[in-house]
Amino acid sequence: MTTVCLSLFRFPTVTGRLWVLGQMALARLSLRQIPGLKFYKLLGTGSDAGFTPSPNTAVWGILTVWDDEATARERLAKEWVFNNWRSNASENWTCYLEPTAAKGKWGRKVPFETGKYESNAVIDGPMVALTRAQIKFRKTPDFWQRVPKIQEMVAADPNVIFKIGLGEWPVLYQATFSIWPDSTTMNAFARGNTPHGIALRDAYKLDWLVEYMFARFRLIGSEGTWEGKDPLERLKQPAPKAPKERKDKKEAA
């Protein structure tokens, strides 16, 4: 079972931020030598929860792909590069994911194998959405004018368990990572008649993208903390109820 890991690290001090900037080049050498590592990306993060051209220099990430969960957990626990990042960060958090659907490429590669899952499979339990887009330079104004409405919608959605914007390069290479309580709420946001769904369809129709990767995962575990707590604590609580529609009462004539 292919296992994908997103590890996030926080570096609140100037010294820590300078250190991790150097690691964006140096860590590649160590990662290339790790047995069983099928794919990796070193990622910056955005100052907001989704697509954003403004970087957050305090938070960085490593995305890795492994043959199975046991290998992923062993390598992340023992390999020097991950221990080095953890020892220099003020906190860290890792999600373990099983790919269930993937479309497109990342760096001209297909990084995620969905294995036993069919494209339209309905999967129980928490789900994760990863959307990565490499935007054509001449299309960036069209793309960025859609972003504020999408950001507002994500921020207002009570079903979003966790969200963060990721990127290999500001403006042109953008990604979002979000965790949802189930596939129904995730699909309603991503593909429905929403700002995100409309922008997604326009990205195809209006030819905005050089390359894209839209992937869905089953959340199989996590470890560490983020902002001093477990971000998945909300999954142990009852799901938020949808607001009831208000109906105006008409007085009888």
Image (cartoon, grey):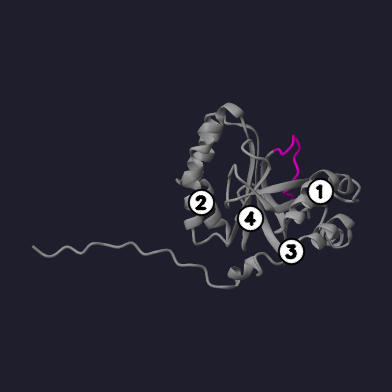
Q: Which residue is mark 2?
A: 189
Q: Residue at x 52, y 32 (%)?
A: 141
Q: Earlier in the sequence, mark 4 or mark 3?
A: 3
Q: Can you give x and y, in whole percent of width and height, for residue 236 in the image?
A: 60, 72
Which amino acid is tagged 1? Gln
| Magenta extent | 105-116
Q: Is residue 13 magenta?
A: no
Q: Are marks 4 and 3 in contact (CB under 8 Å)?
A: no
Q: Are marks 1 and 4 in contact (CB under 8 Å)?
A: no
Q: Is residue 64 visible?
A: no
Q: Which residue is mark 4?
A: 128
Circle 3 — which element?
loop
Circle 2 — which element?
helix
Q: Which residue is mark 1?
A: 23
Comparing labels 1 and 4, the label whose residue is closer to the camera: 1
Spatial separation of the CA atoms under disc 2 and disc 1: 35 Å
Spatial separation of the CA atoms under disc 4 and disc 3: 25 Å
Circle 4 — which element?
strand
- Placement of 40 over or under 3, stated as above or below: above
Q: Residue at x 74, y 34 (%)?
A: 108
Front one among 195 and 168: 168
Circle 1 — which element?
helix
Residue 90's mark? 3
Name the dominant secondary structure of the magenta segment.
loop
Q: Are marks 3 and 1 in contact (CB under 8 Å)?
A: no
Comparing labels 2 and 1, the label whose residue is closer to the camera: 1
Spatial separation of the CA atoms under disc 4 and disc 2: 12 Å
- Placement of 222 over or under 134, stated as above or below: below
Q: Can you give x and y, in whole percent of width and height, for residue 200 in the image?
A: 54, 40
